[in-house]
Image (cartoon, grey):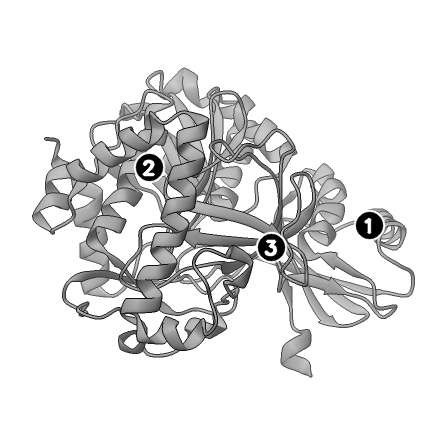
């Protein structure tokens, strides 16, 4: 057994049992899988209706055999003391406990039973093997944040050691720091890169400026996996060019599992082994494949607390090519609470606004990063990092495009800064609306 698996086992997570179950699930044909999925859906609902006082009260009238009778739960429903959400015979000492990042605006502490958490790692390791990577032995270049308190810092450093990874500072993306990163790649046999999209994109831009292809200075490099933030197509192409390896898009949620992972065919394959993913309209009706709506997810194995028809806060589309066994996430639009609301009443995903600007602003060549804030219904601020001010011509072009895609009469102010403020975890929030805070 490898070091990572051994650490899981020593902490009470039955990783071998989880791997065996995963193998059995994946071996099922489509007919067998459909029966398995229906059985697990009913089983997890029935369990929590019987064993979880919180869910019994929340899901009054729910019938495990009638899926449309199962209510949709939101993050707000779960924002109460964790002890009040735990199932019978579950204590804070015999579960895995963590907290969500709060990127949705509704953070909370959650629990997973130990077998459910072991399944999460079994899924992750399985997906890594798609690209001939071993989660324990393959050397990882990790672009993530790290807690700055002493206990949290050394805990993450221990995890880095066990997981064979080197962590890079995502809070310093200056050329000096990125040059140090490049030196590390020149002297270390990294197998893959993993981390926040925005930070890795900045490293790719630096390599482009230096005319360096990373694979040429680090020949062992096999892949780059990005997570936690939106990956835009032009950024993906840039990274593919500058890294010289496949760019793999990951979508997950700490309270659930790995939700989707780009497979070797370039499809964003949804985790159907341990999750059931639905796309719902505003009235909680299930939408057919190909239609855009709210992403709602059921954790099929978490018995510590319920995540049943749980609205994660994202908008997306499942491809028409999807099947129950192999759902494909065709599109991830962004957070439901990251919407642009305009004076006319029109709504658009906040990242649409960001993308309109991005397609123009980065042609400048001097813009390193930028974020957009909605201050009022008709007022927006674009904060950018650059060594010089945006030209009048560029500002005019951005304003014209915003009017074309959204509407006229909007006030756009531009503000140049030396660096952007990231969250404590190191993530960059590309669009923020302050409307709710102002009303």
Judge whether residue 183 can be spotted in this image: no
Badge 1 or badge 2: first in the primary sequence: 2
Q: Which residue is mark 3?
A: 430
**Foreground tag (1 vs 3):** 3
Measuring 40% from the left and 77% from the top, which residue is drawn there? 57
Task: Calculate the distance from the C-alpha at mark 1 to the C-alpha at mark 3.
Answer: 17 Å
Residue 124 is tagged as: 2
Horizontal side, residue 337 vs residue 103: left or right: right
- Tag 3 secondary structure: loop
Is the residue marked by circle 1 packed among few (<14), some (14-19), or many (20+) residues within 10 Å?
Answer: some
Task: Calculate the distance from the C-alpha at mark 2 to the C-alpha at mark 3.
Answer: 27 Å
Which one is in front, 257 or 176? 257
Where residue 164 sits in the image (x, y, percent)?
21, 35
Which one is in front, 146 or 328? 328
- Tag 2 secondary structure: helix
**Foreground tag (2 vs 3):** 2
Is the residue marked by circle 3 packed among few (<14), some (14-19), or many (20+) residues within 10 Å?
Answer: many
């Amino acid at each position: 057994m490898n070091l990572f698996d051994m650490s899981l086992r020593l902490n009470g997570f039955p990783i071998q049992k989880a791997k065996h179950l995963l193998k059995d699930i994946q071996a099922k044909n489509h007919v067998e899988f459909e029966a398995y999925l229906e059985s697990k859906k009913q089983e997890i609902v029935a369990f929590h209706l019987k064993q979880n006082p919180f869910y019994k009260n929340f899901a009054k009238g729910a019938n495990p055999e009638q899926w449309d009778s199962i209510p949709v739960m939101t993050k707000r429903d779960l924002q109460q003391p964790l002890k009040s959400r735990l199932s019978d015979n579950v204590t804070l000492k015999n579960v895995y406990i963590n907290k969500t990042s709060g990127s949705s605006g509704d953070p909370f502490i959650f629990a997973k039973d130990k077998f459910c958490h072991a399944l999460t790692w079994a899924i992750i390791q399985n997906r890594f093997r798609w690209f001939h990577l071993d989660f324990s032995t393959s050397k990882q270049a990790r672009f993530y944040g790290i807690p700055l308190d002493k206990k949290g810092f050394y805990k993450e450093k221990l995890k880095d050691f066990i997981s064979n990874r080197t962590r890079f500072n995502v809070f310093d993306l200056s050329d000096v720091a990125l040059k140090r990163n490049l030196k590390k790649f020149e002297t270390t046999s990294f197998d893959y890169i993993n981390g926040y999209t925005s930070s890795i994109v900045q490293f790719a831009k630096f390599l482009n400026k230096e005319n360096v292809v990373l694979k040429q200075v680090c020949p062992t490099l096999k892949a780059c996996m990005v997570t936690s933030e939106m990956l835009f197509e032009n950024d993906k192409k840039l990274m593919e060019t500058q890294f010289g390896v496949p760019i793999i898009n990951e979508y997950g949620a700490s309270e659930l599992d790995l939700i989707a992972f780009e497979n070797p065919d370039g499809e964003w394959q949804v985790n159907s082994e341990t999750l059931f993913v639905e796309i719902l309209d505003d009235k909680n009706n299930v939408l057919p494949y190909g239609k855009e709506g709210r992403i709602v997810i059921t954790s099929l194995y978490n018995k510590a607390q319920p995540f049943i028809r749980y609205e994660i806060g994202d908008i997306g589309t499942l491809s028409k090519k999807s099947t129950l066994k192999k759902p494909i996430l065709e599109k991830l639009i962004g957070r439901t609470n990251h919407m642009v609301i305009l004076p006319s009443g029109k709504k658009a995903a906040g990242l649409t606004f960001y993308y309109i600007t991005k397609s123009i602003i980065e042609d400048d060549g001097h813009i390193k990063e930028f974020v957009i804030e909605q201050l009022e219904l008709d007022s927006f601020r674009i904060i950018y990092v650059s060594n010089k001010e945006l030209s009048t011509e560029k500002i005019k072009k951005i304003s014209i495009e915003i009017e074309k895609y959204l509407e006229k009469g909007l006030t756009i102010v531009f503000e140049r800064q030396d660096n952007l403020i990231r969250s404590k975890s190191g993530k960059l929030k590309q669009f923020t609306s302050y409307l709710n805070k102002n009303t």
